[in-house]
Image: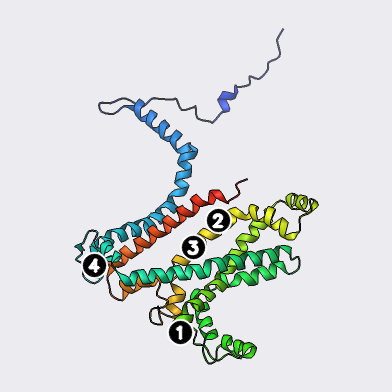
Amino acid sequence: MHRAMTPKVPSPAVFSTAAPPFPERSLPDRPGFSGSRLRASLERAGRLLGSEAVQAWLFLLPALAILATFVAWPAAYSFYLSLHDWDLMSPARRFAGWANYARLARDGQFWTAAAHTLEYALLTVPANMALGLGLALALHRTRRLRTVLRTSYFSPVVTSTVAASAVWMWIYHPEVGLLNDLLHRVFGTGPIPWLADPRWAMPAVALMSVWRSAGYTMVLFLAGLQGVPRELQEAARIDGAGSWGVFRHVTWPMLSPVTLFVFIISIIDSLQVFTQVHVMTQGGPAGATEVVVYYLYYRAFELFQMGYASAVAYVLFAAIVALTVWQLRLSGRWVFKG
């Protein structure tokens, strides 16, 4: 009896075209070369590149390179120049040590410029903060046209300072200026040479600066107002507080961190004023608007005293840092920290 013949099915391994797995082999050790050490180093480098801290530094590296090239290196080179006498034209630089700083302490023109800078700060910082806060409170309560009004008030901030200064020079013109014409129609006053009179030149420049920067201050205060909890304001009204009481006891304390920030950046901005002074008055008349940064520009690019101008820059930098630290220390007494 014959049994039925069944075809023999080959095993799947016969039809498999995949290459056999590559056998793991360790790198051979040779004199001066250890394969196991190389493998361990590669694994350690892979773990290091995979860590979050290294990835964060890799992402930050382009920004750090830009800061080092355009901020840190110029600042360090400026300090180097402040210790030398250099006229910008000749390659030779004579080491002067701290002589530029000692000369600066006896320079009456520098202290006059510092006094003008302080006058400009006293004129602009309180007015800028008051106007920005007033605009923010008005827009916070306004429902209609809020976006249009906010854009209108903010538009001077994005306008070029040179262009804004040129427009205000026409407004201040003693014969055809808009301001003199308005004052003549309302009060019957005669033409006032705003930018040619030492008594009016600095207030005129300060008014233009307040007009230009109030929009930015308004946006900061408006953001702070939108973060004040309505529950606290409604609770104050239930307790019988009026609008002034709600603002004094609830809104203003909650706005104190924003107020501190606005105060610090306003002080820093006022101490570095330059463009509007350069365009509108060029430090005049009779030096009435010569501020510290304009004095620095005059020493550096008109008298070519780069070392002395660098010393002026570093003294201004030290003053800004000292004022900022002083403001931050005093802030603990009046800033609400939650």
Mark 2 and mark 3 lie on one chain; the one further toward the N terminus is 2
Nearer-the-camera pick, 301 or 8: 301
Marker disc for residue 260: 2
Q: Is residue 213 visible?
A: yes
Secondary structure beneath label 4: loop
Above or below, comparing residue 260 to residue 190 in the picture: above
Residue at the spot of label 3? 267
Residue at the spot of label 1? 197
Mark 3 and mark 4 lie on one chain; the one further toward the N terminus is 4
Residue at the spot of label 4? 86
Mark 4 and mark 2: span between their CA atoms?
Answer: 40 Å
Mark 1 and mark 3: span between their CA atoms?
Answer: 26 Å
Query: From the viewer's perspective, is 280 left or right of 10?
Result: left
Q: Find residue 198 and report its horizontal and vertical position in percent.
A: 44, 82
Mark 4 and mark 2 lie on one chain; the one further toward the N terminus is 4
Secondary structure beneath label 1: loop
Q: Can residue 296 be seen in this view?
A: no
Q: Find residue 196 and report its horizontal and vertical position in percent.
A: 45, 85
Mark 2 and mark 3: span between their CA atoms?
Answer: 11 Å
Query: From the viewer's perspective, is 326 left or right of 97?
Result: right
Above or below, comparing residue 71 to residue 114 in the picture: above
Q: Find residue 169 and report its horizontal and vertical position in percent.
A: 50, 83
In front: label 1 or label 3: 1
Tell me the residue at 43%/49% (across/down).
61
Nearer-the-camera pick, 247 or 43: 247
Question: Which class describes the residues within 10 Å of circle 1: few (<14), some (14-19), or many (20+)?
Answer: some
Mark 1 and mark 2 lie on one chain; the one further toward the N terminus is 1
In the picture, which quadrant includes the C terminus?
top right
